[in-house]
Image: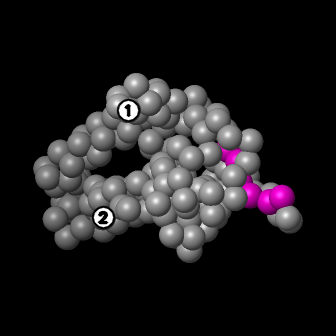
């Protein structure tokens, strides 16, 4: 898995929305230095995952639908990229020529599966409020 720019920017979008009642896309873009088309794409995925909610009309915009104390990096990354695997053979139903005839996965696959599980655990270990608070504490 490669943590994409889109995943990174999704965390930025959430950072912008944290503690706010509602922000317009232009306000989010200005705060986090994201282009509007990219922000709309990210917000659509976050809205589909019910992480943010959108408001229409003159006073429209976006707000968090979940508190940052309920979210972790895994939640955000998974909303943006549901196929959050370090390599394609981790995907369910993938058929590899290296698998044994008995259905047993190759040794490399087994090792990568353990690495994948550890990575997911690490992405889940802290809630975003902890990460965003750390950022505030380290700001000069």
Q: Which residues are magenta?
A: 59-65
Examine the structure image and report whether residue 63 is included in the region drawn in magenta.
yes
Compared across the picture, whether 104 is left or right of 20 comes to left
Going 62% across and 45% down the picture, which residue do you hit?
Answer: 17
According to the image, label 1 marks what residue? 139
In the image, 117 versus 62, the foreground residue is 62
Going 20% across and 70% down the picture, which residue do you hit?
Answer: 97
Give the SS element for disc 2: helix
Give percent across and percent down for residue 130. Answer: 46, 27
Which quadrant is home to the N terminus? bottom left
The extreme bottom residue here reads 37
In the image, 5 versus 19, the foreground residue is 19
In this rendering, the count of numbered labels is 2
Q: Judge the density around disc 1: few (<14), some (14-19), many (≥20) Cα neighbours within 10 Å.
A: few
According to the image, label 2 marks what residue? 88
**First in residue order: circle 1 vs circle 2:** 2
Going 52% across and 30% down the picture, which residue do you hit?
Answer: 129
**Which numbered circle lies on residue 84?**
none
Q: Which image quadrant for residue 131? A: top left
Give the SS element for disc 1: loop
Going 20% across and 53% down the picture, which residue do you hit?
Answer: 109
Cα distance in 3D space between marks 1 and 2? 38 Å
Give percent across and percent down for residue 18. Answer: 60, 39
In the image, 68 versus 45, the foreground residue is 68
């Amino acid at each position: 898995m490669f943590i994409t720019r889109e995943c990174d920017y999704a965390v930025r979008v959430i950072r912008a929305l944290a503690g706010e009642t509602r922000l317009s896309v232009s306000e989010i873009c200005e705060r986090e230095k994201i282009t509007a088309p990219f922000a709309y794409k990210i917000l659509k995925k976050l809205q589909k995952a019910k992480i943010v909610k959108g408001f229409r009309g003159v006073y429209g915009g976006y707000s968090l639908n979940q508190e940052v104390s309920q979210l972790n990096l895994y939640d955000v990354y998974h909303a943006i990229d549901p196929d959050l695997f370090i390599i394609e053979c981790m995907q369910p139903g993938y058929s590899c020529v290296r698998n044994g005839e008995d259905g047993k996965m190759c040794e490399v696959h087994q090792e990568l599966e353990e690495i994948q599980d550890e990575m997911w655990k690490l992405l889940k270990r802290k809630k975003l409020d902890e990460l965003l608070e750390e950022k505030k504490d380290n700001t000069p």
